């Protein structure tokens, strides 16, 4: 499975964010609404890309809520 993990990787990028109401359930820091972009690559070739919006923690980066 190590080989599989090496060939396929997924990158999550935050394109922009703005403050949102609410706090993180893990660390209690402020939440932000972020425009995310996830791209999945196989052997360094992008095969799948998707943009989505989520509420994330500005400190630990955990996704608190995601929209489609
Ligand atoms: Zn947090």
Image: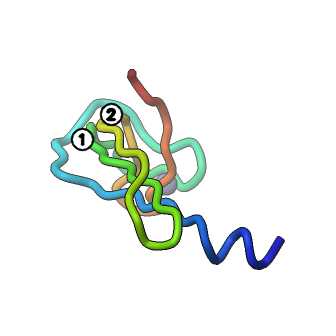
Q: Disc number at residue 35?
A: 1
Instruction: Tell me which residue sits at (19%, 52%) in the image.
Output: 15
Q: Badge 2 is on which residue?
A: 52
Q: Earlier in the sequence, mark 2 or mark 1?
A: 1
Q: Quadrant of the N terminus?
A: bottom right
Q: Nearer the viewer, residue 63 or 49?
A: 49
Q: Looking at the image, do the residues carrying marks 2 and 1 touch, with CB atoms under 8 Å apart? A: yes
**Helix, strand or loop at disc 1?**
strand
**Helix, strand or loop at disc 2?**
strand
Instruction: Tell me which residue sits at (39%, 23%) in the image.
Output: 67
**Residue 51, position as x, y percentages in the image:** 29, 37
Instruction: Tell me which residue sits at (35%, 39%) in the image.
Output: 50
Q: Nearer the viewer, residue 25 or 61?
A: 61
**Residue 68, position as x, y percentages in the image:** 39, 21
Instruction: Tell me which residue sits at (34%, 56%) in the image.
Output: 58
Residue 41 versus residue 38 in the image, above or below = below
**Residue 16, position as x, y percentages in the image:** 16, 49
Q: Residues within 10 Å of mark 1 (few under 14, many from 20)?
A: some
Q: Residue furthest right?
A: 1
**Residue 47, position as x, y percentages in the image:** 42, 51
């Amino acid at each position: 499975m190590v080989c599989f993990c090496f060939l396929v990787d997924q990158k999550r990028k935050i394109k922009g964010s703005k403050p949102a109401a609410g706090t993180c359930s893990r660390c209690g820091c402020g939440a932000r609404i972020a425009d995310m972009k996830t791209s999945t690559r196989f052997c360094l070739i992008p095969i799948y890309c998707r943009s989505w919006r989520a509420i994330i923690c500005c400190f630990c980066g955990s996704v608190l809520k995601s929209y489609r």
